[in-house]
Image (cartoon, rainbow, N blue to C red):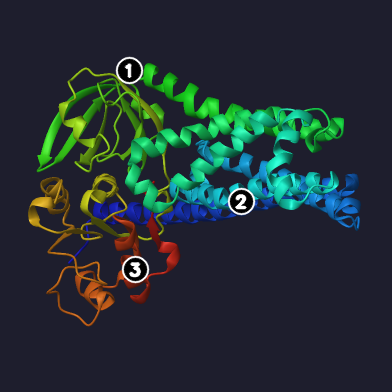
Amino acid sequence: MTTHPRGQRTRRTADANLRKARLLGQRHQAWRRSRGDLLEVAAVASLVLVVAVYLRDGGSHDLLAGDFATELVSVGRLTGLISVDLLLIQMLLAARVPWLDRVYGADRALKAHRILGRVTVPLVLLHMEALILGYAARDHRGAWFGVVVEPFVMLRNVPDMLTAFAATALMVVIAVTSVRAAVHAMGYERWHLVHLTAYAAVTLSIPHQLSIGSDLTQSGLVHAYWLALYVGVAASIVWWRAVVPVYRSVRHQLRVEAVVEEGPGTWSVWVRGRRLEELDARSGQFFNWRFNAPGLRTFAHPWSLSIMPSDRHLRLTVRDLGDHSRALAGLRPGTRVLIEGPYGAFTTAQRTRRRVLLIAAGIGVTPIRALAEELAADPTVRPGDLTIAYRADAADRLALRTELEQLTQSRGHALHLLTGPPVEGSWLPDGLPGRDDADRLRQLVPNPRQHDVYICGPNVWMDLVHSSLRAAGVPRRNIHDERFSW
């Protein structure tokens, strides 16, 4: 049997495209790792610089003065400087700067933001308490009496202490409401509103931090350094969280085109616009969406794209989980839409294998469906290279099922609909053959280690998927997810 020359050329072209895609994926992963390392080194270097300058300018003498009051005050000053630096790093992580988002992804940036918050607030409290006790000891007041009296003395003698105390109180409120139990009890809208006060807290702290005689203004060079940090972070927040979203929304004339019910308690919102290719959005990414409609104007919600973006349309698909998602069902065509984004690194830019396994649970299917559409249209993906595993408690909870069936059947790919009640310690439904999840996975997907794997679903469920993938031999670098919880 002779192979037609045109078929050989097509095969060679497909192989060349695949090699190019693999190389681009490897370069993208290497770029993320190197830039991530560089950013982390820069963050640590900023802390080292802060401590070194403080020690150089007399801090080392005060820390070892042999006088309890002086040493306490010195500890308070140093912890204050460190907490300011960490707070500015936190604010930069929340500014949604595109290159930061591409390096870390929205989930890793948010996780780093949370971790820094757990360190920063205790440092701020230590800073305040050390200064209060140090000044009380210097004024020969007892510890208990000093804790009560000294703050009022500081209000009178230390510049801008009233706003500093107010800023500290707001930070404590933010820290308390960030506890997981409090977050779920409050709901997204209230949690988001409380966290917006972080900007007020930082603003209130600035007069005290940059007042004449503070450690941030010890010399012209030190003052200029801190001022540049403040201005740079503030400009990033204003530009990327306010100016750019408004400009893009107006420029692209985003409006609701239609709302389609996809199943019980699930709706898709089609958004039309012009020149949407300029947004440079990719399948797997999400936007923060704000709709000019009652109950939806105040807050922006993070929802993933559920189709591959085009030059005219975007689509989001949501399930009725509260937090205003139900209100989307009542949106009228023509409603104006304001967006922030696109955000996230959950894209095929990380792909290095020809075969791809997409695993979804519940409404986590939305970015998976968009990725499936992009991959099905990719010339480097051959028939049978794409496998989708979709987990749900019941068949009527399989949102976008028909679209996934059409995508896979028309291109010769595989779709596994995994329905049934949750099974403790497993991400799969009961009744599948196999010793454990890794063994069951191998039966669903032969040679899983030869795949790039994309996962989206509840966090605990994704942890179980990760464990079975690693047990099945899938390298960590080929497992991609993005945690969309807040």
Where residue 382 appears, as percent x and y from the top left, is: 25, 56
Q: Residue at x 39, y 17 (%)?
A: 251
Disc 2 and disc 3: Cα gap in Å? 46 Å
Q: Is residue 319 above or below residue 311?
A: below
Instruction: Give amino acid for label 2.
Output: Pro
Sequence-first tag of 2 and 3: 2
Whether residue 16 is situated above or below residue 429 in the rendered picture: above
Name the residue that disc number 2 marks. 122
**Toward the viewer: 258 or 426?**
426
The residue where tag 1 is placed is 253
Q: Disc 3 designates what residue?
A: 450
Residue name at image x 24 percent, y 54 percent: 7
Mark nearer the N terminus (1 vs 2): 2
Instruction: Specify whether 32 is left or right of 231.
Output: left
Q: Secondary structure at mark 3?
A: helix
Q: Nearer the viewer, residue 36 or 165?
A: 165
Q: Are marks 3 and 1 in contact (CB under 8 Å)?
A: no
The residue mark sitting in front, 3 or 1, is 1
**Is the residue marked by circle 2 packed among few (<14), some (14-19), or many (20+) residues within 10 Å?**
some
